[in-house]
């Protein structure tokens, strides 16, 4: 075999486990058992899945409350997009703790946008609200830019906004955990006020990585104190785990800049969306139980449930013939008790929802099963649908190539990986059976090379052409 062919096959084999782990890391945090140390690097890309999945969300999963899939002779797998219907809470005066990332990655346009956001926010908050602005960077450079919490119209707040471009400059590396803890120490818990952290930056913590355990502890602390974490992504390289992880744990949201903040109308429109996101009703579950039809569910701890978007709950149905999925949630909205009796009918399982099987398996095997999905539920499903199908197709394409170069051990592993991703895929089952026949002496290598991917591929090809391209 040529060196080029050897180099091509090696990363494929090494990448089987890594490829499958990549999806889970994007959706659920660090799914690699025993590797939630701070040294684990961030997952790059847009923190909310970006434009990659916008169209898929709108057309496939945005209005589908429940998806199901059933492996052969297996229990029904479900994905429930839980969205509570609760009235808007009575307005409370706000305490807004603004943390502005002033590290090197924010130099230039990002800090200019941060100044525009702080200025616009101060103009739209009410007279009973309070604002505190912080510069977030290395431990020595992290400090308050205002003298505690101030009225939005105070000169101290305006001066802090100006300082973001006239005094501060992008330098150093952010200590996100240490800086957040330092700033939170100035926010005395007060359930009579609507308290939020507003983070402006890219989510990176280059000074010291934030581990999954540390992120869960930070989010848990804010959730217990009824403090929501909201993030406005600024910059080029975003840390999705920190941005979405902390918002999901506290009932907050990631609010992307879509407007031109340099213009007054754009600034006003963006801040209006931001304040609207702050004021959405959020159910904080205290106790919950699923109906007897549910055999297992993830996350094992229900996160805060926002009324403006769905939260992903997945699991398996243990009762054959169940027609619906249900849950009872006791919690609070703005400190007021609420009881939710939730239920949804179970649709018939679909074979193209096979990606649900891998999602549930990865959640079950994750070191932190209580951690919620980092992405909004429809985006998480759209991303998983796209990525898992690509993984399956790549495994099958590489398996065909491995057969063509007489690497039958590798072909067997690749077919097994494809079947793990999609237990009902006929091409994977067909290829694995052919390799087994060849090993048993019932099929020659020449016949195997001719038959692999043939009948099963033809049966699954959509009209108009093949589903995959052989290499």
Image (cartoon, rainbow, N blue to C red):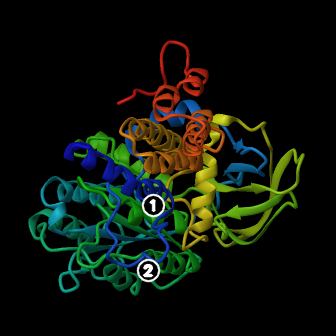
- Mark 2 vs mark 1, foreground winner is 1
Q: Secondary structure at mark 1?
A: helix
Q: Which mark is residue 88?
A: none
Residue at image mark 2: 214
Dot 2 or dot 1: first in sequence order is 1
Q: State left or right for residue 185 relative to residue 72.
A: left
Whether residue 20 is situated above or below residue 381 in the rendered picture = below
Whether residue 87 is situated above or below residue 94 in the rendered picture = above
Q: Which mark is residue 25?
A: 1
The CA distance from mark 2 to mark 1 is 16 Å
Question: Residue 168: where, in percent of width, then height?
Answer: 13, 70
Q: State left or right for residue 143 relative to residue 64.
A: left
Question: Which residue does the image show at 39% across and 28% down from the upper left?
Answer: 470
Along the viewing direction, whichever of 37 and 10 lies nearer the viewer: 10
Whether residue 67 is situated above or below residue 145 in the rendered picture = above
Question: Residue 130: where, in percent of width, then height?
Answer: 40, 72
Q: Secondary structure at mark 2?
A: helix
Q: State left or right for residue 311 relative to residue 70.
A: left
The image quadrant that residue 114 belongs to is bottom left
Q: State left or right for residue 233 relative to residue 335.
A: left
Question: Which residue does the image show at 23% across and 84% down from the upper left?
Answer: 139
- Position of the C terminus, as image quadrant, is top left
Q: Could you tell me how many numbered marks the image carries?
A: 2
């Amino acid at each position: 075999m040529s060196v080029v062919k050897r180099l091509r096959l090696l990363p494929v084999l090494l990448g089987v486990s890594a490829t499958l782990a990549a999806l889970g890391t994007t959706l659920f945090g660090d799914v690699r058992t025993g590797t939630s140390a701070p040294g684990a690097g961030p997952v790059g890309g847009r923190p909310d899945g970006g434009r990659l999945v916008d169209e898929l969300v709108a057309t496939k999963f945005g209005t589908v409350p429940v998806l199901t899939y059933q492996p052969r002779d297996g229990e029904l797998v479900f994905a429930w997009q839980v969205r509570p219907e609760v009235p808007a809470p009575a307005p409370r005066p706000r305490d807004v703790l603004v943390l502005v990332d002033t590290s090197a990655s924010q130099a230039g346009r990002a800090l200019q946008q941060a100044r525009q956001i702080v200025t616009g926010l101060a103009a739209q908050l009410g007279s009973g609200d309070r604002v505190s602005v912080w510069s977030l960077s290395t431990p020595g450079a992290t400090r308050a830019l205002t003298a505690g919490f101030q009225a939005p119209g105070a000169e101290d707040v305006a001066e802090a906004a100006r300082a973001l471009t006239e005094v501060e400059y992008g330098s150093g590396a952010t200590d996100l955990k240490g800086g957040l803890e330092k700033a939170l120490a100035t926010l005395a818990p007060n359930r009579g006020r609507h308290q939020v952290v507003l983070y402006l930056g890219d989510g990176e913590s280059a000074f010291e990585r934030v581990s999954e355990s540390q992120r869960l502890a930070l989010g848990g602390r804010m959730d217990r104190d009824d403090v929501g974490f909201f993030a406005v992504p600024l910059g080029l390289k975003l840390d999705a785990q920190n941005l979405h992880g902390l918002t999901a744990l506290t009932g907050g949201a990631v609010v992307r800049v879509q407007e031109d903040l340099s213009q007054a109308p754009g600034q006003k429109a963006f801040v209006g969306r931001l304040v609207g996101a702050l004021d959405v009703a959020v159910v904080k579950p205290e106790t919950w139980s699923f109906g007897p039809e549910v055999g297992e569910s993830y996350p094992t701890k229900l996160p805060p449930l926002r009324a403006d978007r769905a939260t992903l709950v997945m699991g398996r149905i243990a009762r054959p013939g169940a027609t619906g999925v249900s849950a009872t949630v006791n919690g609070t909205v703005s400190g007021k008790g609420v009881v939710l009796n939730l239920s949804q009918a179970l649709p018939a399982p679909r074979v193209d929802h096979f990606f649900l099987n891998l999602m549930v398996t990865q959640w079950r095997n994750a070191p932190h099963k209580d951690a919620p999905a980092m992405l909004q539920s429809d985006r998480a499903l759209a991303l998983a649908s796209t990525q898992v199908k690509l993984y399956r197709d790549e495994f099958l394409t590489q398996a065909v190539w491995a057969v063509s170069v007489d690497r039958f051990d590798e072909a067997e592993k690749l077919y097994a990986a494809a079947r793990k991703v999609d237990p009902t895929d006929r091409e994977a089952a067909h290829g694995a059976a052919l390799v087994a026949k060849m090993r048993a002496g019932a099929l020659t290598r020449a016949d195997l090379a001719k038959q692999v991917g043939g009948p099963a591929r033809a049966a699954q090809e959509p009209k108009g052409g093949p589903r995959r391209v052989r290499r």
